[in-house]
Every structure is written in C-alpha cells, then in structure tokens.
Image (tube, rainbow, N blue to C red):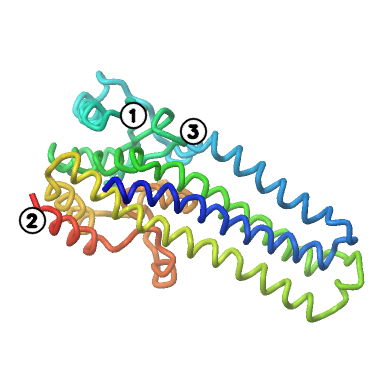
Amino acid sequence: MYRAIARNKRNTVFIILLFLILIAVLAFVADAIWGGGNWAIFTGTIVGALIYVVIQYFASGRQAVALSGARPIEKRDDPRLYRIVENLSITEGLPMPKVYIVDDPAPNAFAAGRDPQHAVVAATTGLLEMMTDAELEGVMAHEMGHVKNYDIRVTTIVFGLVVAIGFIADILMRMSFFGGNRNNNGGNPIVLVLGIAAMILAPLAATMVQAAVSREREYLADATGAMTTRHPEALASALAKLGQYGRPMRRQNTSMAHMWLSDPTKPGIVDRMFSTHPPLEKRIARLRTIGSGF
C-alpha cells in the first residue's frame, strides 16, 4: 500500500511533464503558423497555461463545492456523517476535512482540495438515505483514501491542465479558420494541416491520460478505504447499490466528473471509452479479493 502511494506521488511528476509537453506542442504549432519568429506566442502560451494551473490549484476545493452546489455542515447538522468522517480522520491520522452535503437524490460522494490540510469531502442526500452505517463508512473511507493518497492534488492539477489544453486548442482552431497568418509558414498547407491535426489530437490525448490516471486512483482509494475500515465488503456492498440504484445527478458538470465516487452522468458508448471511473463490477471484484485476505 505504501509503495503504491509513493509510486502515485512519483507518477504525478511524469503526468505533469506529459501534459506540459502537450501544451508545448500546441504552443510550437501556433508559433510556427502565426508567430513572427521571436517565440512570443510560444512563451505566452506556456506562461498563460501555467498561471491558469496555479490558480486552479489553489481554488480547486472552492470550485468543486460551487459546481456541485454543496452546503457545509457541522456535527449538529448531520451527526451520523460528521462522526464517520471524524472517526476516519482520527484513524488515518489526517486533519479533519470540511464536510459538505449535496442535496441530490442520486447516491454519490466526492473529495477535493490541494492537500490533506485543505481537503473537503461531500456526500449526497441520496447516499445518506440509501447506505447503512457500515456502507457509508466504507464510502467515506474511500474518499478519505483519496485525501491520504494525495489523489485530490493530482486530479486538481490534471483537471487544470486538461482544461488548459482544450482552451488553447479551441483558440488555435478558431485562428486557423478565421485568423490571419503572420508569416510564410501560415500559407503552407502542409504546416496548416499538421497544425490542425495537433490541435485535434492533443485534447484527445489529454483526456485519455486523465481517464487512465483517474481509474488507477479509484482502485487505490478503494484498497485504502478497505484497509482503513478492515471491512472491504461494506464498500463492495455500497458500490453494488450504486450499480443497482444509481442515477444521474440533477446538477451535472463533466469537468468534475472524475472527482465523484461514481460517474455522475449517464454516458454513452463513446463517453465510456474516456470514462474516468473503472467499471463497478471490477471494483467490487477487487474488494472481495481483498476481503478474502482478512
């Protein structure tokens, strides 16, 4: 488990470098087509993307709360949920995160923030109504697992970089069709075609990497939660209920879909290819394998 967490932290560096390479490719294409040879567009694109990611890093927790419509609670507001999170924090030796409730009948939960000292966890009213105490503890242990493993930091940075790549690619695509060319390279159809291909493929590559990263972290958070509670069957039972009774959330936002316990949308066939969550059946099977070891 500790080796997996350490590997996660090391992989974060490589993930960030990969995304920065994708941004650099887009910036290079822009400079090759429209730049005047002084690398101004290249430099401006890189700097702008990094500034955006830094802002996203510090604002991620508040942004997730705002997008989900969550409301903060104290112990007196929902003693059951608050005490479960409090007990898990003590067990894991983590700071007590801020606790939120989302008024939505769809059963779900999420964790966000940049580190354990600035973490937030939230559960929907549908989750609270549907789960037994043991199942709710399993779900919140999963979310606290994301906090402990620093997944919340990774997903925050990756989310910011994916959005930045999509935003840059969109601007460059518009410039390709409607903008003027500043140098001779812009008149070269081969350069233009290659540039457009890079603008299309870069966001797709970024989304695929994001999905792969998120899936592995879901598995690790499941295992971390199971080790914390010593009751993996409780989380497996909760996931089974999500598969049987889950529904799309009323307030959906695809930009934070990867933060939820299960996909808050109702994806189609193409969307499942880029899903940020592994199939519930596989997660349940892994948990039951862990359970056989206790």
Q: Which mark is nearer the camera, 1 or 2?
A: 2
First of labels 2, 3 by sequence position: 3
Residue 127 position in % (x across, y down)? 24, 42
Amino acid bearing label 3: Arg
Q: Indicate the secondary structure of the residue bearing disc 2.
A: loop
Question: Do callouts 2 and 3 mark residues in contact (Cβ within 8 Å)?
Answer: no
Amino acid bearing label 2: Ser
* x 14%, y 51%: residue: 237
Residue 111 position in % (x across, y down)? 37, 40
Q: Could you say which disc has been placed on residue 292 in the image?
A: 2
The answer to which quarter of the image holds residue 243 is: bottom left
Find disc 3 in the rendering and name its residue. Answer: 62
Q: Is residue 69 left or right of residue 104?
A: right
* x 78%, y 81%: residue: 190
Residue 119 position in % (x across, y down)? 40, 32
* x 44%, y 71%: residue: 270
Find disc 1 in the rendering and name its residue. Answer: 99
Q: CA distance from mark 1 to mark 3?
A: 12 Å
Question: Do callouts 1 and 3 mark residues in contact (Cβ within 8 Å)?
Answer: no
Taking the view exactly as shown, the residue that stands out farthest to the top is: 76
Q: Which mark is nearer the camera, 2 or 3?
A: 2
First of labels 1, 2 by sequence position: 1
Label 1 Cα neighbours within 10 Å, binned few <14 / some 14-19 / many ≥20: many
